Amino acid sequence: MAARWGAEPAGRSSGPFRFALTLPGALVTLLLILFALSLLFVLAFRVNDSSLFGAGFTFDNFITVATDPLYGLVIVRSLVIAGLVTLATVVTAYPIAYYLSFHVGARRPLILFLVTLPFWTSYLLRVFAWKIVLAYNGVLNSALMLSGIWHSPSTAFLNTPAAVVLTLAHAYAPFAILPILVSLDTIPRSLTEAAADLGARPFTAFRRVILPNSMPGVLAGAVVVFVPTVGDYVTPALVGGPSSTMIGTLIQAEFGKAQDWPFGSALAVVVMLVILAVIVAVRFADRRFGSRA
Amino acid sequence: MNAARRDRGGWLPVYVVAYLIFLYLPVALIPLFSFNDSIQAAFPLKGFTLAWYQGLAGNEALRDALMTSIGIGLSAAFVATLCGITIAYGELAWGSRFHRLLSGLARMPILIPGVIVGIALLIAVNIAGLGPSRTAIVLGHVLVALPATVIVMRGSFQAIPKSIPEVAEDLGATDAVVFRRIMLPLALPAAAAAFMLAFLTSFDEFIVAFFLAGTQPTLPLYIWNQLRFPKSLPTVMALGTAILIFSILLAGTAELIRRRGLRRIPV
């Protein structure tokens, strides 16, 4: 991607203009993003002396994360829950994106709008709606009892890891559709026609041509769902109960009740490293299995 | 053309309808129970009432939270859109390594969970002496909305044929004139859409605001506090319904503006 227009100012002085146009973005990205993340990184190596920025230099925070089995357990649980949510979201979103790209025709804008609309409604209320559905005296239980399938309300729905997966998969459902749709739209239609002309049956053409070519979108969608779900603490708090505490809950507690900012920062750094590792692994696997990502 | 391309997708339309039902059913419960004459959100419904909506009208804490959210949302959307326009333009027009770095950094918050964005900014605003405050939430929401505004503006600038700014330059327009008289007007509908999306993102954002809020709660923080009290549940659902309608109207408007903008670009 080289410079397009305006590559050569051609003797005209556009320096001040370029400076003015660069300034706001540079301030926000360098000062807010880089500076804040660097602070977080440094604080992770400090000793908690209940001052604002800790004291000294130590690896203790990371040693505690590595040795206390609680943190390993919660991190693995967060990865499993986020992984299941990502899998469910991508697998259910793919047919929607496929339909929108290959079959829908004139109604495409309408369906696309309907699919993305819930994303613009309150996230807290979307999560809370599931609490209403799954609670002991909630919608699901009262419906089951009214219809005579159940005789007494069940507590088996709410406060389980399964409730967290279901709720998150619902809350992030539209996230995966757009990236997959974009990648499906860029596949030249001549490719599928060529596959058909060469005798591939529809499913073979899908498996050998369309699916590999849409992998970049699938992976982008997976990342967009995986990242926010790994760190979520709202959904575990509302529908998860104690057995589904996630790593975001622990980080939040260190910056709240526990008042150990350096340790909370160390947890955050570990989470970012884990996310980075997952993304690198997925990229590697993708290249290995020969898609066009 | 083989059979699979000619038909309407076999079972796919059925699946799409089922998916939409799954998407909307839990959300639809909120308006439903907001008219129900009972504290509990359970079937069978008890009777129709508007009492919960009347409770909203005189609630001063709610009005303050709404005002705080609107103020923060407008400020954050303004800054995020300004940065989105300038960062995307810098990258696409000049393409220097520095401008590409800025654009990459600006899109990075997508890869960071909200809880980490929240605590990183909490540390930063405390070091800077600002502390948790409205300004801190605005900064946090700028970061959360920035990837979207940059991506929307990049798409919009990329859709403009390169020949247009090139012709302008050949005719003697300076950098500033190309931007102000040609590129910005063509990208204005996308900028408006980016502004609305940024506003809605901020208006709905809870996870980052939770860490950065001072004494004035935003609307999602107010809702979060109310969720602890079973008694205020129906009022929260009436509030949720109002937010739902507002968000749908705003998202619909943003979509219409975006589509009109696409049509305006000469091809």
Image (tube, coloured by chain):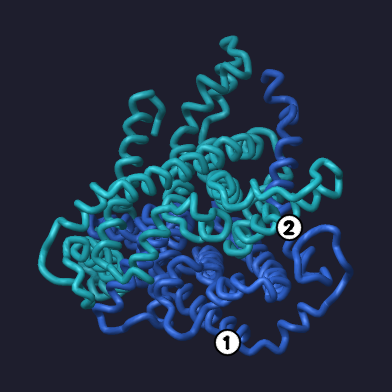
Residue B218 position, x and y percent, is: 52, 78
Residue A1 position, x and y percent, is: 31, 46
Q: Nearer the viewer, residue A255 or B185?
A: A255
Q: Given the image, on which type of amino acid does mark 2 rest?
A: Asn
Residue at 59 percent of width and 40 percent of height: A93
Residue furthest to the top in view is A199
- Circle count: 2
Q: Are marks 2 and 1 in contact (CB under 8 Å)?
A: no
Q: Nearer the viewer, residue B256 or A214?
A: A214
Q: Nearer the viewer, residue B249 or B214?
A: B214
* Residue topped by disc 1: B64
Disc 2 to disc 1, C-alpha distance: 33 Å
Residues packed near mark 1 inside 10 Å, few (<14), some (14 to 19) or many (20 plus): some
Q: Given the image, on which type of amino acid does mark 1 rest?
A: Asp
Q: Is residue A138 above or below residue B223?
A: above
Specify the label residue A137 is tagged with.
2
